Image (spheres, grey):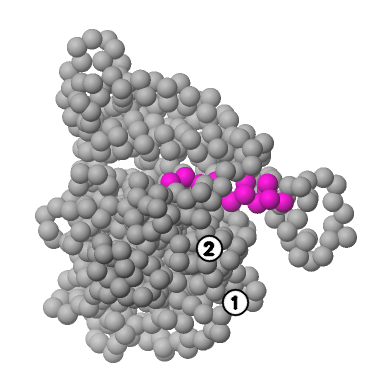
Amino acid sequence: MLSMGMPDITPVTEFYNRITNHYMKMIKRWMLPLVLILLTASVTTAQTAAKEDVLKGWHLRDQSKDGFFGISLEQAYQFLGNRKSAPVIVAVIDSGIDTLHEDIIPVLWRNPGEIPGNGIDDDKNGYVDDVYGWNFLGGKDGRNVKEDSYEAARLYHMLKKKYNGNVDETRLSAVEKEEYRTFLRAKEDIENSATDAQGNLLFLRGLFKKAGTSDSLLREKFKPEYTGNELASFKPANSKESDAKSTMSTLFRGFEMMDATNVFIMEEFTSYYNGLEKKSEAMDLPPKNYRQDIVQDDYYDFNDRYYGNNDVMASTPFHGTHVAGIIAAARNNGLGMDGVADNVRIMVIRAVPDGDEHDKDIAHAIRYAVDNGAKVINMSFGKSFSPQKKWVDDAIRYARSKGVLLVHAAGNDGKNLDSTHNYPNPVFADTKERATNFITVGASGDPKSGGLAADFSNYGKQEVDVFAPGVKIYSTIPGGNTYGFSQGTSMASPVVAGLAALLLSYFPDLTPEQVKYCIEKGARNPGMQVKKPGSEGKEDFANFSRTGGIINAYESVKIAASLKGERTDGPQPTPQPKPKVKKSNKG
């Protein structure tokens, strides 16, 4: 599931704090918690706009120079000076990307072996007209899967008949015991999710109905689209229009996307609401097989891999568009915002629906990226169950054998991944070996915006490698060349992917292991106690990840230069020998 986090909303009352704490604990996995949007009404549009202007691009800034705990990107580029860079392909496995966005068009990967629109597989890779990438959630007739079920529900109902009752574990084989424990965990997961979703729906049902009525009324006035900024200047003629303006303004401010259209806001709100309804019914109703009618692959045959279509934008490109902009939005063009890396081509791979992704799609997405030249793969998604983990593990091994780095969002539960299930992960199920080409990223913030450690971020001294800015990140959003804020470890992961691409662009001979070394060695521990994610207590920031730090582009490029024998200012890190990469017969 997409790993987007919570809007940054300032508490205004004791009631607000109580509700906020309740829903922070309630949110299961990666959805944007729109349950809080009603509680933002006290923040005026002017106040919101002023705060947003200050925070635009904060994640790229330098703490000593600018006062923000960003990644010191300007200093990194100053250090790189006149060095020449080489283009690097970064694959974004996500919900889709707006390939018409002004800041994305210049950085899109274009398949050099494919002639657009001729209906022929020109490059003979098995995927017809894959000009920008591929959509593993589509059908050959052009239709696309938008929403899907949750893995816990899929597993629970698949195993329910076999294990729902009195089970004597002593009579089970080793494989069955593992399967039974997975069933129990899935059952607990959907029971808790259903209870929380039902309570949440009670809170949201009135707003959902009112928002639909209000938007319909305002569409008649604006015929039919309007932005939050246009709504702010709208002067109601009567009490109905005033009430409609108030309701929709609250939604725009809750999303903190005043430039977005009402169509986009209502689509996102509706998607979240429908997701809650699915969770509330998950115990009683078997999940609908959303892909059976559309994708029509033989899911359990891994060799059936040439499914899908080339519609990489589809109808759900918000998340992927925001992620892509963070990595590589065209720099210094005077538009919107700047990406981290300056010589990148974004390969678009759609494999993540509204719901939990399927292991088969992710495994084939990784392999597609590797086979088509990607050197970095960003994965801002995740889930608690992975029934076909072997497929994904083998794809990660394949990426390692081809020198490709995978960057993965840690997730937004505020939990310790050292003791929590989270997939995909770098630990191979069969050997317990750890992939050396895999980075797991937690989300940091700034004292001016959400605290130094994002309250929603997962963490782990063993399982999370680094933290990167992921709170109130301003980036590209789809529809009309617009921009907006979002947050989550989904936004932290592409900051790291962007830095990895930057390193490979200027130091193209680095192995994935060396890139990871430069990023981790360059991370800086802020050296302070901060609020621990998911709790009220404080702890040393160093305890939240293996490195104990927040990534720093300036430090990382200096380390990369030193690995190549160049002199750099400041202390010289100890050069790391080129790691030996084990070849795998499973690739």
Q: Are marks 2 and 1 in contact (CB under 8 Å)?
A: no
Name the residue rendered at 78%, 51% in the picture.
Answer: 162
Tag 1 secondary structure: loop
The answer to whether 112 is drawn above or below residue 193 in the figure is below
Name the residue rendered at 48%, 77% in the picture.
Answer: 398
Label 2: few (<14), some (14–19) or many (≥20) C-alpha neighbours in 10 Å: many
Q: Please give the label number shown on residue 360.
A: 2
Residue 533 visible in the displayed image: no
The amino acid type of the residue labelled 1 equals Glu
Magenta stretch mostly in which secondary structure?
Answer: helix
Name the residue rendered at 82%, 65% in the picture.
Answer: 173
Asked which quadrant contains residue 207, the reply is top left
Q: Is residue 528 magenta?
A: no
Label 1: few (<14), some (14–19) or many (≥20) C-alpha neighbours in 10 Å: few
The residue tagged 1 is 433
Q: Please give the label number shown on residue 580.
A: none
Q: Is residue 150 magenta?
A: yes
Span shown in magenta = 146-159
Tag 2 secondary structure: helix
The amino acid type of the residue labelled 2 equals Lys
